[in-house]
Amino acid sequence: MPTQSFILPLLVLVPLIAGLVMLLPLPMFNDRRNIFHWALLATLATFALSLKMAFAFDFHGPTFQLRGLTPWVSQFGLQFGWGVDAISLWLILLTTFLMPIVVLSSLTAITERSREYYFWLLLIQAAMTGTFIATDIIFFYICFEFTLVPLYFLIGVFGSGDRLRAAAVFFIYTFTGSMLTFAAVLYVAYHAGWNFDIEAMYGAARSLSGTEQAWVFLALMAGFAVKVPIWPLHTWLPLAHTEAPTAGSVILAGVLLKLGTYGILRFVLPMCPLAVLEYAPCVGIMAVCGIILTALICWVQTDIKRLIAYSSVSHLGFCVLGLFALDRLDIGAHGAVMYMVNHGLSTGALFLCVGMIYERFHTRDMEEMSGLGRSLPVWSSFMVFFVLASVGLPGLNGFVGEFLTLLGAFCSPPEVLGMVYAAVAGLGLIFGAIYLLYMVGRVIFGPTKLPHVHGKLNDLSGREIVVLAPIALACLVLGLAPNLMLDTLDNSVAQLTGPAKSQLPAAVVQKEEGTEAPRHQGTEGLVADAIGGPWSLGASVPWCLCLDPPVPSSEVSR
Amino acid sequence: MAVETLKFLPWIPLLGAVLCAICCTSPALRRLAGAICVLSVASALALALGVYFGPQSQAALSGTTVHALRWIDVHSFSAGFSYYIDGLTMIMLFVVTGIGALIALYATGYMKGDRGYARFFFGVCLFIFAMTTLVMADSLVLLYLGWEGVGLCSYLLIGYYYDKPFAVEAAKKAFIVNRIGDLGFALGIFLTWTTFDTVSLHEAIEKARHILEHGGEITTAMQCIPFLLMAGAFGKSAQFPLYVWLPDAMAGPTPVSALIHAATMVTSGVFMIARLIPIFELSTYALPVVAIIGTFTALLAATIALTNNDLKGVFAYSTVSQLGYMFLGVGVLSTTGGIFHLFTHAFFKALLFLTAGSVMHALAGQLDIRTMGGLRKRMPVTCWLMFAGCLALAGVPPFSGFVSKDMILHDALARGLHGEPLFFVLAIAGLFTALLTAYYTFRLWFRVFMGPERFEMGEEHGHDEHAAHDEHASGGHGPHEMPWWPMNLPLVVLAIGAIAAGILAEYVGGEHGWMHTMIEHSTASVEHEFHGELFGLSLHSVMVVLSLLIAALGIGTAAYLHWLRRDAAGVLEQKFAPLVKLLVNKYYVDELYDLAIVRPLRGCGKFFNLIDDYLIQGFLVQIVGGWGPRLVGYVLKPSQSGRLQSYGVGMAVGVVIVMVILIFKLTGN
């Protein structure tokens, strides 16, 4: 299928070129509506392309498909390599699905400098898609970093209130993290003979000693954990979300945060299996803390947008928990991928809903409004629907991811996570219901109280319904037929979690019992090495908080 | 009809819900919602009946798995829309769709003219979908879907009058308290999966039964599963300590209270334990704990009901109390008794709530029974319908409530007499609760319908359509009887059930009666048979006599204090003022929860929010990110002066330092 391998670069190039064309001094772009239509057309075309990609993808075939390669600076081994597996396929679909919606939602919100605005939107789409199609770590990293620039401008120029500070904090915070990621990438690439291809990187990283892997792990995680964000590295997020324009929030919550979890799944898990096992309990504890503490924080917010922003932190804790579950059947990882897409849909939709309220009232303060159900029934129905999706009501999409990630953590081997993690994280289900229903009770129910409105207060317009309805439909479809996605993930997920799982004591023992199974090169040495990782976490990992002290792997393998 | 057709059953009400949702969008269609809802629920009932009386019923109805759709599959973990049909399922389907159809019919009259008419029936249809899914589910995850689904509908319908802050609070409380139980349930499902390697209900039950019958290692996990599932059951079925949401849930429209918070949803906890009884039997302590909690809740709720002056409140607490009996039933392994009581309770409690709704409707929303009296002349039909319900609730033989409650208490007593003193104590507590039940039930009835006539109209003036309809019926102001169609007729059917369902299900159909046969052909069947003797009489006869005596005593006291000598009741109230105060305030449990759980958690939230805002946002961003670099810059700035000589000095110093290090290194070696 040589022709089809062009689909993927087109996914990046179409929005990129459309954005650049928009900057040309064409008379057509002097009209705000023309710009809007141009951007809408470009995003819709990209969505159509991504559907073509989905149909061209053979779900029973090899994991990476539609691959292609183009040299860049071949002297240094730099190249653009692309391809998709089922995981990135779904995330690309999420991105291309959300972008036309985001553009459509901006029609009335952005009235000035719209050429600039849509340019940045198209650019960020190109960058996000680029990260998902990259099979070459430099390509990935460039796109990963480049997402910061458009968002910096989207927040800084089109945001509200304290937008400059928010943009700066956002930029510096995430940039600092990803510099460390870059260092790790270079270190591994050095061992791979300056080959940045993802498979080569996997191989090179896995052959590193335990200590080295631990450092690589920490450095990679520095960038990804800030992006996710994993508690306590989340503090840039509420600020950025609150001040960002609606579109920025939707993109941020919908897709950009997933770059972090995607990065963990794509790079961290397969690259440093030893360190993953070593640090999984620590990450697990951070995820659980994040779920619970930020859920409590949500409860005391008065700004709706800030509440939803914090809820993202809480929700992504489940996702991280699922990623690090490493359970036998990969239930956790399946759930985590599902969660990425689901969270993108439901939280994105919540931000859209809040944006619509902000456009009407110019406030997001819950104390100033109440009983909107009476005056805005259609909006309220959508809002309640997405809140329920977010709360994890079975039958809607949120449930599937939440359930599977928790089940994964519950089934996770005791050396990694375990029942206690799932049980404590499960409290997040209760707190999630508390803060979201608190918001619904405050804003939608209760006696009617409206902030001052200029002119007549209108319920959702046709355009706004068209914005929300597709997301609602997607929530329903993924909630009732999650197998559409789950069935496709098996191979891709197994490939990414496999290396770490094969290092589990049980797996190592099994391997050594089976005579034919090739022994992992120097397993014993690696495990012993891993025990002397940075800050020598050693056999008593993780610190004093460890709930199920792992059996020292070296003992088992003996 | 073949048993497989049952897989379409839940989807009929869902279709109804979709249609009702469409009706919501246009005022012209709004009136159709009621009819759509009644029709869809009635057709679900017809389908269930059709299958039950179908040609191949008996064999198929004692345990068939019907696969409908796939849902969540990850490798060998598989949870689909698959249904398990057995006797228990059929009983529950009859209750849910049968009572549901009657209540929906009543509601078409009750809710007439309300602006949320279509929204209401959307909720009811959705509820029937979730509830039928719950009772039919084979996969535990699907059961969980129904479980959360009914919770959602309960939330939406309690909060139906969403501009009343109390209703909104009550709805939220119901959902959240239920969620607490649901967490336990979810963890129970997880543990079932890791222990039995399946989330299919019948497979897990088979494995558990295999261990029970053939012996086998009972692991700690198996001991724990019932306790986790129990949490879910206690949340949904409003048992101690999670019962607090149910009394508040009465903020919803009365048909909702009757359907969801009396007849069907709140009994799903009992259903779940009965369904999974072999898994509960694996654990040594699980079932006794269920029995203890059930009895305790029954007693606790009955005492609160003694002094409650709210028409619906009394019935709400009595529901909590009766649910306690059901838990006692399944707890003493009398699953037949537990489910039987669930069955009869659905009739008489729905009847009681709906008649209470009629009274409330007639009095424009008045709920305080202290303002009522002698309404029997104005509302004769309602009066005597409620009387039938009260007799059943009070456990007067041979009304249906007696037959089922008797079975539970009899089995508990029999086990108590066979050397299990715990159950003896529980049975005695159950009998004492029966006394309280008879008293508070008739206290309410005498207060409302007997004595001199008096009433105060409530604050709901009704809507335009409503007022017109009121005047039609009564030709003036003041309370009036409800019309036969569509309101009183369904009540008559319920009343017949309340009077006769017990006797019929106990003595007709099969050797041991219909109920027994159905339960025997289900996952809820247990091996044990309980018999006993007391004072030379068979325990059954003793129970009949005891029940009669207790009911007579309770009703007599109520008649004396609340009909014949109302002043005496006042004197008594004065005498026990502190106790009454404690009861009226419901033992201050809500306040306690608020103080012990809600406030600390909110405090934590505020605390962590502050940390986020100031410590991290302020310290990290302002100091480390802002002042730190600036300070470094400030310190180093003078060195970048641009003067050549200072650069030269700097360079020289640098060279000297490097040389010194080199020299030391060289000489050191």
Image: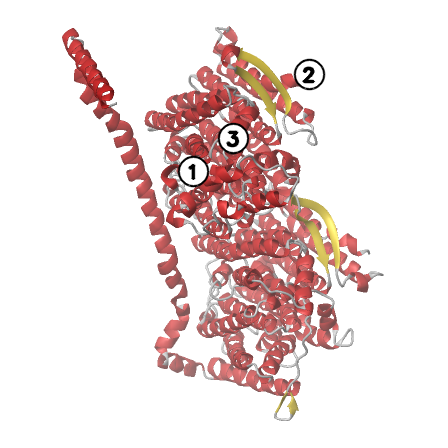
Q: Mark 3: which secondary structure?
A: loop
Residue A243 % position (x, y): 38, 30
Which of pointers 3 and 1 indicates the residue nearer the eye? 3
Quarter holding the N terminus of chain A? Answer: top right
Q: In the displayed structure, does residue A322 sit left or right of residue A451?
A: right
Taking B498 as reference, is A115 left or right? Answer: left
Q: What kind of residue is marked 1?
A: Ile
Q: Is residue B666 above or below residue A279?
A: above
Closer-to-camera residue (A510/A141): A510
Cα distance in 3D space between marks 3 and 2: 34 Å
Contact between labelled residues 1 and 3, with CB atoms less than 8 Å apart:
no
- Residue count near mark 1 (Cα–Cα under 10 Å), binned few <14, some 14–19, many ≥20: many
> What SS does tag 2 mark?
loop
* B565 or A296, nearer to the observer: A296
Pointer 3 or 1: first along the chain: 3
Could you classify mark 2 by the number of other residues whose Cα lies within 10 Å: few (under 14), some (14-19), or many (20 or more)?
few
Q: Which chain carries label 1?
A: A
Mark number, residue A207: 3
Q: Is residue B29 visible?
A: no
Q: Are marks 1 and 2 on the same chain?
A: yes
Residue that label 2 marks: A2
Q: Which of B115 and A259 is in front in this view?
A: A259
Q: Position of residue A137 (x, y in %)?
A: 51, 23
Residue B270 is left or right of residue A276, and the answer is: right
CA gap, disc 1 to disc 2? 40 Å
Q: Are marks 3 and 2 in contact (CB under 8 Å)?
A: no
Identify the mark nearer the N-term, 3 or 2: 2
Residue A230, which numbered label?
Answer: 1
